[in-house]
Amino acid sequence: MAVVLGVCMAGCYRVSDTFPPNRVYTVRLERAFRQPFEPQRQAELRKLMTDLFGGPDQPRVPAEVRSLGLFNDEWLAAAAGPVGSDKGGRSKGLFREHCAVCHGVSGDGVGPVAFVLKPYPRDFRRGLFKFKATPKGAKPTHEDLRRIIETGIPGTGMPSYRVLPAWEIDALAQYVTYLSVRGEVERGLIDYAAGELRPDQPIVDEDATDEEQATQRRVISDLVSTVARSWRQSESLVTPVRPPKSGRDRNASIARGRELFLGDVANCVKCHGPSALGDGQTTDYDDWAKEIDPTDSIALAEYCRSGALGPRPIQPRNLRLGIYHGGGRPEDLYRRIHNGIDGTPMPAALIKAPNSPPSTKGLTEDDIWCLVDYISSLPGTSETNSSP
Amino acid sequence: MANRQSAVVAQHDRMSPWPFRLAVMLSCVTFPLISIGGLVTSYDAGMAVPDWPNTYGYNLLLYPYTTWLFGPWDLFLEHGHRLLGVLAGLFAMGLVAVTYRVDSRRPARIATVAALVAVTAQGGLGGARVLLDDRQLAMLHGCVGPAFFAYCVALASCLSPKWQSLVPKLLGAHSDRKMLLDQKLRRFTLLLALLFYVQLVLGAQLRHIPVTAGPWLFNMSLLLHLTNAVLLTLSVTVLGLSLRRGRVEPELRPVVSAMAVLLCIQLVLGVTTWVVKYGWPYWFAQSLFAASFTVHAKSMTQTGIATLHMAVGSLILAAAVLTHVQTRQLLRAQLRNAPRQTTPGMVK
């Protein structure tokens, strides 16, 4: 009996040839436009996506992306597909071996283990990442993704993969990019179909004239190029970090940092609390949760039925522990405060020119260094001596 | 009656120790076999050798040992696991051969043949797991392993001349009250062994969770695994207390104590396995030890602890099965003795 059961279960959990569609986002647009996605539209989307990007076993790179040189076929082949290794002992199926239990085969962040983790594993399909050297709205660099995979994120479920050879980490970082590009294109297509087309109108009409079909295909190809270019650009968008003025007085800098932290321009106190324990604003949500309308219980029920994980409020970091998820070097902290944390409520600093009049609202680069100094001075000190 | 009894004693005194020795050796090979099997899972090395029964086209036994010993780690594990499997098969064959020569009891013969069939089937299952490259089959293979190990241990106990000779010596010390207790104990230990096995299957489900499964499957298995852990801890505590109060045959003391000690270790290992795999639960997020803890995937600590958790689980299962089998043996001895007091309540 156990054998029969086992064989039956074996059938149920095979990884299919196509990636599962983004149901949750479809539901979101169905709700927004008050119009259901017809089954044939869902089928068409799935087919279009498979034509463009292939499936979990055979990833494909659309021509528009290929020309940008974003992907290396050898890495892609090693990261995708079922787990195993070839005769030379080189591993295959890296993503499914290491990441899919948490991040899901399609990178939707709903792997089997996802629910028990807080924070939830990242949904890669929005192309939205927290810890990177680039500003909010920009994509992470390859190096940013590598760093996360290599060091992991302390205090969360995200493991460090330091034991893997460097090329495997490269391959995995690139596969994360692949899943993101794919996910963003899928979202773009869902947006386009819901917003621009009649419910029964196909995205690419096989019956239309060649000319019309070419126009329709150009929409898709433009979408793919836009997404791929945003990834290509990231390297050039890295926020520069100019070292602080030499010979500054550290104590004065810390004092100024504290003033800024508590003041209403930087207003760090709003979320991180007066004693920086992360106990200020604790009822807000991150962008992934906001997408499923966390405060609307009826909508939420529908999202959860289509596979979303229930939203949980995001906690601002307790800065007195001195543990940082995006790296603890001064330049990491500088970038984090300068750029904010994408996908979370933590805002980018409002920057003003160094010699603008004092009445202008905003922070200078020096102010940010003062904040860095203040924050670095917090771990190990008692809470009381910095309360106002 | 007295004649029959002395005949029994005589028969056991003459019993050849060889079936027992082979069964013990089989158990001793099976334990590392399933532990390395667990490591194979930890390192996802199951597919390190993609063919079966050959290893990269070589006959299993002729695969160049230098490549095996000095090649990639996952190949070392997988091929080693297969070689140990072959060894277990050989011991099982030896066991059958010897038992047929020296032991005329039918149940003993059948039991050893069953062991041989089981080890062969398990090897086939392992092969199917590789050829079909399937995680659920891997899980099934992983669940049969510990059951087979427990079976071998129980078999060794049944073939043990020492236990067999112990049994007739017990015949004098018999009372109805005790027999009743032992009957309860037999049912209780059977339930315990079954629950331990369920616990192992749930643990395997957690480890082999298919990547396409929805979170509900993992959540449910986890919940059951934890609830069952509490249940088992309580049961073993009850058993331990009864032993201390003298309600359980003192002959069972070693195995029950071993089970209790192993269970304590197992609880610690279980918590540790979780932490090294998924980090501290969020309740501890405000403590430095939890906030600064980074999970290190595939590290020695992670794989070592997960495998230990599994290996100790198999040992506990074997201990539980052994407790049950020995309880049965004690009970059987008492029953054999029972006809002497045909009227209940008659003072012996």
Image: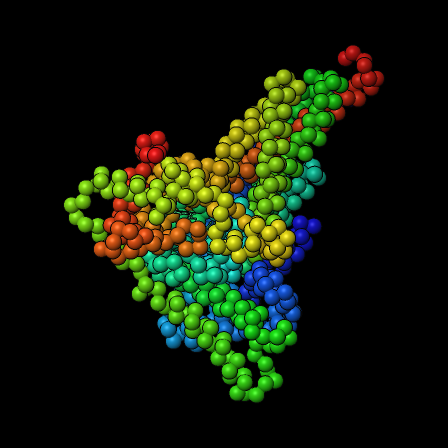
* Residue B334 to residue A371: above or below: above
Work out whether residue A3 or residue A217 is closer to the camera in this orientation and state it.
Answer: A217
Figure disc tally: 0
Q: Quadrant of residue B230?
A: top right
Residue B152 appears in the picture as rendered: no
The answer to whether B331 appears left or right of A144 in the picture is right
> Residue, x 43% and y 73% (percent of image)?
A225
The answer to whether B116 appears left or right of A260 in the picture is right
The answer to whether B295 appears left or right of B165 in the picture is left
* Residue B205 to residue B323: above or below: below
Residue A295 appears in the picture as rendered: yes
Q: Position of residue B208 (x, y in %)?
A: 55, 50
> Residue, x 63% and y 65% (percent of image)?
A34
Q: Residue furthest top?
A: B347
> Residue, x 32% and y 31% (percent of image)?
A385
Viewport quadrant of the C terminus of chain A: top left
Q: Residue furthest left?
A: A247
Q: Position of residue A191 (x, y in %)?
A: 54, 68
> Residue, x 36% and y 45% (percent of image)?
A264
Q: Position of residue B150 (x, y in %)?
A: 60, 38
> What colour scheme governs how the chains and residues are painted in the rendered image of this protein?
rainbow
Work out whether residue A371 or residue B24 is closer to the camera in this orientation and state it.
Answer: A371
Q: Position of residue B56 (x, y in %)?
A: 46, 62
